[in-house]
Amino acid sequence: MFQKMLLSIFVLVGVTSMVAGDAEANWSETFDNMAFDLSTWVWGCYPDITKTFTHNITDKPGTTNDYLTLRETTSVGSSPYPGSAFGMGFGSNQTFTDVRVGAVINVAGDDSRNLFGIAARANYFVDPDGSMSGAPGMVTTGCYMLLYHWEDGPSNVRIEILKIYMNDDEIMKVWQPEVPVPGLDHVRSHYVELDVVGSGPVYVTGSIYEYKGGPLLVRTPTMVDTSGNDPWEKPGLNDGVYDSGKSSIFSINQDAVPVGYHSSFDSVSSVSDGPAAVCLSPANGTIGVSRDADLSWKEAAFATSRELWFGKPGLMQKVTPPGTSYDPGTLEFSQTYEWRVDEIGSATVQGHVWTFTTGPCFAVDDFESYADDAAIAAKWVDVFLGVFLDTGTVHSGAKAMRLQYQNQYPPYITEATRTFTAAQDWTANDVKALSLFFRGRADNVEQEMYVKLEDADGASYKVIHPYKFAVQSELSWYEWTIDLKNFSDGNDVKLDAIKKITIGTGDGFKSGQSEEPPDIDTIYIDDVTLCPCRCFNLEKLDLRSDLDGNCKVNFEDLAVMANGWLNDGLSIK
């Protein structure tokens, strides 16, 4: 119980700051020359009983480049006087909204369970006698954090983004799985960085570099935190976002063995004019992007203008869009593009280089442009249960649509319908097929899944997936390709005037889902596209020599091969 109480106190939700402070003043600390650059450091731990938590500058012999060590030498939870479960340092009482917290961390030794990192939008209060928290010490009241740790030795280093939260039935929420840091040479220094941008939603990204300004080692997917029930939260939880707070460093050990914790930091900084642009669309690494795609992104609050760099790899050119979107015109088929947004304010912050690749298809919806559940529900209308934005189960990019359904109740079908503002011409550019990716759950009940099109005159037709058990496909994503002639030939749907697309489940009869307790089944949809003539090879023919993808092996493929004849890549002999 006491161990759980320690963890509970560390992970409270912060809504408002309990310590007053000014906003948006940058600060930095080097710990050089065995002295603090800042006179505003505030240190604390919980519980603060044994007084064995220390925060000392350590001399690095032969240099003025010294470093800070956070250390606890008493085991957590030991009786009768437990050591602290965590220790924190706040470089300043300044409150930040959009912020980049950075630090050079030093890793030494072979101790397991070393957990430490940096935090943003954190708040705290000091409980000197334990009357509020059960024990004396510093109580944090919420933060977003980048946790750097190895729990199985320094050859297994991982990072993760956390949102710290507690209520009666939940202690800590982890947004994403741990992200491994590549390589084995971790007993050294790295530069870690935490960017937090926005207030509804909030975008949180963690990065590790070889050194500040050096090569990127690993970056977490961006956490998207809203005031609603996010996909990474327990059902029914709608905790608010953290709008502002202070920046800190910390070290943790929640286990009795090994004893205490220790970590060191070579420098720390917190800047409001530092976070890079986020929430990009198309998402980094997306393939199959429409040739008509626009670029869009979310900027930090400090930015008053920007420079956009865009082009083929190695050939990016600068443009200066007036806002946070840009129309690059019609792009080439199957071409990779690079782009970067440099934000300009009191300083210029160079953004990250992102890439995407166009495909042979045109995007109807890749779901990347939606900010939250409300935004996707406004486009894909489902009057029975609801559609949701999912960031945990995606085919490509960072987002997908989650469709939930209870077809054990009338009308025994569930449909999500997108209505286009203007009727769409689905015959242009030699389009031949509608394609989408889907994924189900193993515990779903077998039932029909279908796609329905409706034209501007109200004529409609639905195509049913050939397998009812497709909704149970949990292990991987599957592409469903539908010849558009199925909707038009003999079915009166005008493909040059498509007004609505519907994705649905059920056949109008009871599905067999449980009624007591009510069973909710789920499918995921991503990358809805229109495709011109290309090889779908539904007959599974041997077409390995079809180099141009037209479902024929002929002299055109021989020309493709001859064009690359005698090309020689790197080989080890």
Image: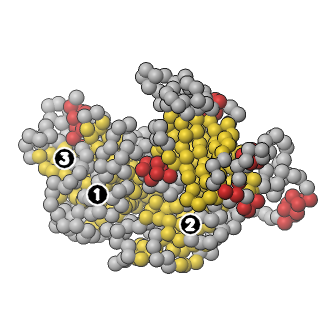
Badge 2 or badge 1: first in the primary sequence = 1
Residue nearer the viewer, 550 or 251: 550
Residue nearer the viewer, 477 or 505: 505
Badge 1 or badge 3: first in the primary sequence = 3
Q: What residue is rendered at 18% in x and 36% in y?
A: 82
As drawn, the label of residue 243 is 1
Badge 3 or badge 2: first in the primary sequence = 3
Q: Quadrant of the C terminus?
A: bottom right
- Crowding near the residue tagged with mark 2, few <14, some 14–19, many ≥20 C-alpha atoms within 10 Å: some
- Crowding near the residue tagged with mark 1, few <14, some 14–19, many ≥20 C-alpha atoms within 10 Å: many
Secondary-structure class at tag 1: loop
Q: Nearer the viewer, mark 3 or mark 2?
A: 2
Side (left or right) of 267 relative to 338: left
Residue type at the position of mark 3: Val
For label 2, the residue is 294
Residue 79, picture quadrant: top left
Secondary-structure class at tag 3: strand
Look at the picture and state if 332 lies above or below 264.
Answer: below
Give me the C-alpha separation between circle 1 and circle 3.
19 Å
For label 3, the residue is 139
Find out whether the residues at labels 3 and 2 contact each other: C-beta distance under 8 Å.
Answer: no
Find out whether the residues at labels 1 and 3 contact each other: C-beta distance under 8 Å.
Answer: no
Residue type at the position of mark 1: Asp
